[in-house]
Amino acid sequence: MNKQKIRFLIVEDDEMIRLIHKDFLKDLYPESEIIEAENGAQGICHYFESHPNIILLDMMMPIMGGEAFLDILEEGHNSNILKDKPKIIVVTAIKDVKELMSIGKRFAVEAVISKPLVQNQLKSLLEDWIS
Amino acid sequence: MNTTLPQKDDFWSVPVFDSERALSRVHQKQELLKRVIDIFIKSLSERIDIIENEICNENWDKLETMAHSIKGSSWTIGAQQLGDIAYAMEKAASNEDMTLLVHLFQIFKEASKRFIEYEKEMRF
């Protein structure tokens, strides 16, 4: 992945956490494009419009949560509507280990990071993918 | 359902606000932290109103989601006390324990005032 063309999608209902994610990503990749969504439904719309390479996804959100967001992406991919497979990093405050493990096995989920987000974890993941 | 309700002191021993942790979350950017805390405080009063309504409606899913969301944002900005109470509220909502949830919500409202007052005094 080329850092000059990288496109991030942040799907997170909390404005404050979106702002922190966005600031962090802009510092790391100033030329990247960052798209924000307040819930899974908005996230799906932005996904179809913008085809982001990397998605930071919260799980528990009003209107549409992360589970439904992943269901739709998986369905789209399985039915060949979606060609590209994004890399999804789930950032969640869920503490239940079984639940976290099952999220980790979902379609396109590359990593599950606990809130509060330790940004070095995110940074090292991104550095593995982006040149 | 629960027999012993938690007391304020169970939460009061945790710091109201851990500024070092908060600053580390925003890479030591004080201006960003101010913006983040402003958003957090604004959202607190909105969320309190929502929880009050949803308690009346016994909307457990919404109550759990709301408490979960408050927990995440509180811990993110170092509002440890509020995060811990919200976590307890999330579990109470998940167990559909109204007595405990209402009790914790009263503590949460008081802790919110404490946080806002503390933050005003500490405005950096």
Image (cartoon, helix red, strand yellow):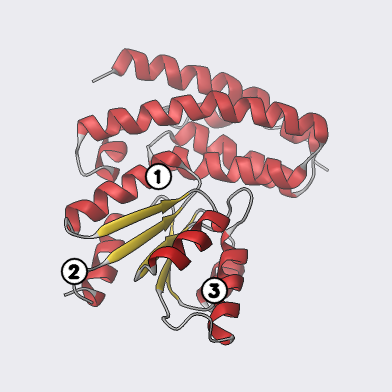
Write down the residue under mark 1: A17
Q: Nearer the viewer, residue B57 or B24?
A: B57
* Amino acid type at image mark 1: Ile
* Amino acid type at image mark 2: Lys
Q: Chain of mark 1?
A: A
Q: Which quarter of the picture shows residue A46?
A: bottom left
CA separation in Å, label 2 and label 1:
23 Å
Please report whichever mark, 3 or 1, sits nearer to the chain's N-terminal start.
Answer: 1
Residue A2 picture location, percent across and down? 19, 74
Q: What secondary structure is found at the residue carrying circle 3?
A: helix
Residue A63 picture location, percent across and down? 64, 50
Asked if both marks, 3 and 1, belong to the same chain, the answer given is yes
Please report whichever mark, 2 or 1, sits nearer to the chain's N-terminal start.
Answer: 2
Write down the residue under mark 2: A3
Q: Residue at x 38, y 37 (%)?
A: B78
- Callout 3 crowding tier (Cα within 10 Å): few <14, some 14–19, many ≥20: many
**Placement of B31 over or under A94, stated as above or below:** above
Residue B49 visible? The answer is yes
* Amino acid type at image mark 3: Leu
- Callout 1 crowding tier (Cα within 10 Å): few <14, some 14–19, many ≥20: many
**Placement of B78 over or under A90, stated as above or below:** above
Q: Residue at x 58, y 31 (%)?
A: B10
Q: Which quadrant: the N terminus of chain A?
A: bottom left
Q: Residue at x 52, y 23 (%)?
A: B112
Write down the residue under mark 3: A73
Residue contact between numbered discs 3 and 1, judged by CB atoms under 8 Å: no
Foreground label between 3 and 1: 3
Q: What secondary structure is found at the residue carrying circle 2?
A: loop
